[in-house]
Image (cartoon, grey):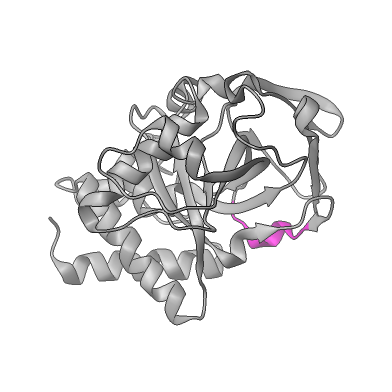
Amino acid sequence: MLPQDIIASLARQLYDARKTRTQLRHFSKQFPEMTIEDGYAIQREWVKLEIADGRTIKGRKIGLTSRAMQQASQITEPDYAPLMDDMFFEAGGDIPFNRFIAPRVEVELAFILDKPLKGPGVTLFDVLSASGYVVPAIEIIDSRIEQFDRETRVMRKVFDTISDFAANAGIVLGGSPVRPMDVDLRRVGALLHKNGVIEETGLAAAVLNHPATGVAWLANKIAPYDEQLNAGDVVLSGSFTRPTAAAAGDTFHVDYGSLGCVSFRFI
């Protein structure tokens, strides 16, 4: 593990980068000995800084669960991060583009928990039982740490992504909530339109064969830290499309078929 003073310093750099909308160089380049545990330690220190500002945690996100996302990021394992209260935006409205550095959009399903989930041993069926409903969601990801190094163009490592809140920056919930046993969640599909043009399509089965599998993975992953998923948490189960780049003025509309639509515009 990196020394605690370095972990705290890197967390402060990310906290400042989010506020000033400036990008940092890869931590993994500066500290080649960095590990996944270091990444999560930095993430936890950053959360402490946000909470000190009055922010609260409203849930969690799981990233890099689909083959499409793993290929896009050149990373082969899932990651996770908290959803802070100031990351939630209303569907059908305008989102200030200047809240972000280099935003991209992903298509997901969100599980809203009625009961807590604490690992180890949480299964897909436990997730379905604990979830009050599932709702369409768009995640806005961002890069406080450069995706590609500005000089070498080398892709950032999983340690960098984990440190950087797993690239989490925003979430938009919408469409029609559904009880998790009322539909085959694997078959939920989505069409992502950007400025009226279809950019991405996908099925939720791309997320570990079933989106609830990702939620079970998360509950078990955080258990060794004596953490759990709580009733009322919003859990993003992972994207089943590749990320789509966004610019000021872009309008996004995602059609989830029988589960409705989610739309917003960057201004």
| Residue drawn where x is 42% and y is 52% of the image | 81
Residue range (magenta): 95-101
| Residue drawn where x is 57% and y is 21% of the image | 186
Above/below status of 13 relative to 127? below
Above/below status of 234 relative to 184? below
Tell which of 26 and 60 is nearer to you. Answer: 60
Point out residue 171 in the picture as x, y percentages from the top left corner. Answer: 63, 51
Tell which of 138 and 117 is nearer to you. Answer: 117
Please check the rendered image and state whether residue 99 is part of the magenta-colored stretch, yes or no: yes
Please check the rendered image and state whether residue 225 is part of the magenta-colored stretch, yes or no: no
Q: Which residue is the extreme one toward the right?
A: 196
Q: Is residue 73 left or right of residue 122?
A: right
Tell which of 108 and 41 is nearer to you. Answer: 108
Point out residue 154 in the picture as x, y percentages from the top left corner. Answer: 36, 34
Of the 4 image quadrants, the one containing the C terminus is bottom right
Point out residue 148 in the picture as x, y percentages from the top left corner. Answer: 43, 39
Q: Is residue 199 left or right of residue 170?
A: right
- Quarter residue 1 falls in: bottom left
Point out residue 144 in the picture as x, y percentages from the top left corner. Answer: 47, 55
